[in-house]
Amino acid sequence: MYTKFVGVVTYDEDGIKMFTKLKNPIKGSLQVVFSKSNSEESQTAARREAREETSLELPQMQYLVTDQNYDCDIYICDIERFKLRRMKPEKASL
């Protein structure tokens, strides 16, 4: 499946893990892992982006839905057993 964008919603027993943007134009906004798919299969792109943003390999991601308005596949993943880390601390914080 190929879409223009992918998103990964990570969660644990405390709830959804969101990042706070640290730079303008959307400084202070909350977001989940999100990126362009770069013409990759959407699940491959979602795994790559999650790895780049959080350092996590997410083998058990589950497809949730495609947002047709934004051409975006959304995946979810329970990260309870993983240790989440910021990989781009200059751009977003946990």
Image (cartoon, rainbow, N blue to C red):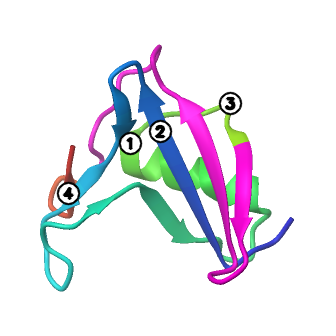
Dot 1: few (<14), some (14–19), or many (≥20) neighbours within 10 Å?
some
Dot 3: few (<14), some (14–19), or many (≥20) neighbours within 10 Å?
few
Q: Are marks 2 and 1 in contact (CB under 8 Å)?
A: yes
Q: Which residue is mark 2?
A: 10
Q: Is residue 23 magenta?
A: no
Sooner in the amino-acid sequence: mark 2 or mark 4:
2
**What is the magenta range?**
63-87
Q: Residue at x 64, y 48 (%)?
A: 75
Residue 28 at x, y = what percent? 13, 66
Residue 5 at x, y = what percent? 62, 73
Q: Quadrant of the N terminus?
A: bottom right
Measure how far apart labels 2 and 1 are at the Cα level: 10 Å
Q: Which residue is mark 1?
A: 54
Q: Are marks 3 and 2 in contact (CB under 8 Å)?
A: no
Dot 4: few (<14), some (14–19), or many (≥20) neighbours within 10 Å?
some
Measure how far apart labels 2 and 4 are at the Cα level: 14 Å
Q: Is residue 21 left or right of residue 68?
A: left
Sooner in the amino-acid sequence: mark 1 or mark 4:
4
Residue 20, which numbered label?
Answer: 4
Residue mark closest to the camera, 2 vs 1 = 2
Q: Quadrant of residue 31?
A: bottom left
Dot 2: few (<14), some (14–19), or many (≥20) neighbours within 10 Å?
many
Amino acid type at mark 1: Thr
Q: Which residue is mark 3?
A: 59
Residue 76 at x, y = what percent? 60, 41
Amino acid type at mark 2: Thr
Secondary element type, mark 3: loop
